[in-house]
Image: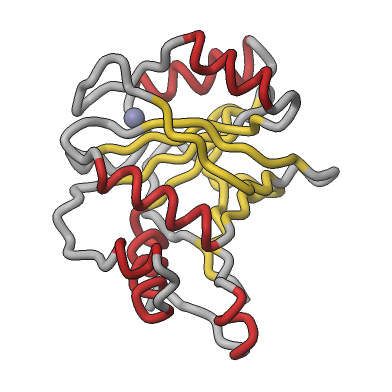
Amino acid sequence: MPQEARGKGQPGARKREGGSVVLPRAVQRALLRDVWGRREIEACGLLRGEIDAEGNWHVVAVHPLPNIAESPVFFEFAPEDVLQLELAYPGQIIGVYHSHPGGLHGASRTDRATMRRVNEEQQIPWVWLIVCGPFTADLPVVEASAGERAAEETCARWLAEQLLAYYHDPSEGLQQVVAVLEPGPQSAEAGQSVRAE
Ligand SMILES: [Zn+2]
């Protein structure tokens, strides 16, 4: 059984009934590498994958993009960067991630407005991941990237607490989405799951 991210979330964002976002271990590693690698600003990028018939987002890769605002409290993509990826992977961009190096555990007002605009007004069904800092924990990100299993599990436990996922449903409003953190193949072979507690 993969574990589910249990970020505390925030008032006003109801848990979404159906639809979860599924993150394989390689995607988890890539997210951590990016948010730790440029933790002085908000790291950001696009998520590539597919949306299944039940509305679940299956992420297969993350594409870090420059934060042209270079800000610790705000992120902004260059439109041409987004366009380039959409052209390279038509129909495969399914969401956005960014980090909160200042530690805000939840979606900011700006985040909420952006989600509403894209999901509701533009009717683009992107999922939104926020990796909430602060990024001061001594996580074995490098070891996890090398596939070291204990390190991967430590990182996955951290992500289970600090990763939030959202979708602004056009009829239901802002929803918190369950993030399913899939274990790597070694963990699956051993028949073990990683639990947050
Ligand atoms: Zn934010």
Q: Residue furthest right?
A: 53
x then y, percent, for residue 153? 40, 75
Return the x and y of residue 149 as percentages of the image width and height: 43, 79
Instruction: Choose between 144 and 132: the one closer to the eye.
Output: 144
Q: Identify the colour scheme used.
A: secondary structure
Q: Residue at x 17, y 61 (%)?
A: 137
| Ligand 1 - quadrant of the structure image | top left
Q: Residue furthest bottom?
A: 190
Q: Is residue 60 left or right of residue 35?
A: right
Quadrant of the drawing holding the C terminus = bottom left
The image quadrant where one finds the N terminus is bottom right
Q: Is residue 87 left or right of residue 160?
A: right
Q: Is residue 162 above or below residue 35?
A: below
Image point (52%, 58%), residue name: 26
Asked whether 131 or 197 is in front, the reply is 131
Residue 62 screen position, x and y as percent: 52, 41
Q: Quadrant of residue 41?
A: top left
Measured as percent of width and height from the top left, residue 142 is found at 30, 63
Residue at (80% x, 44% y) in the render: 52
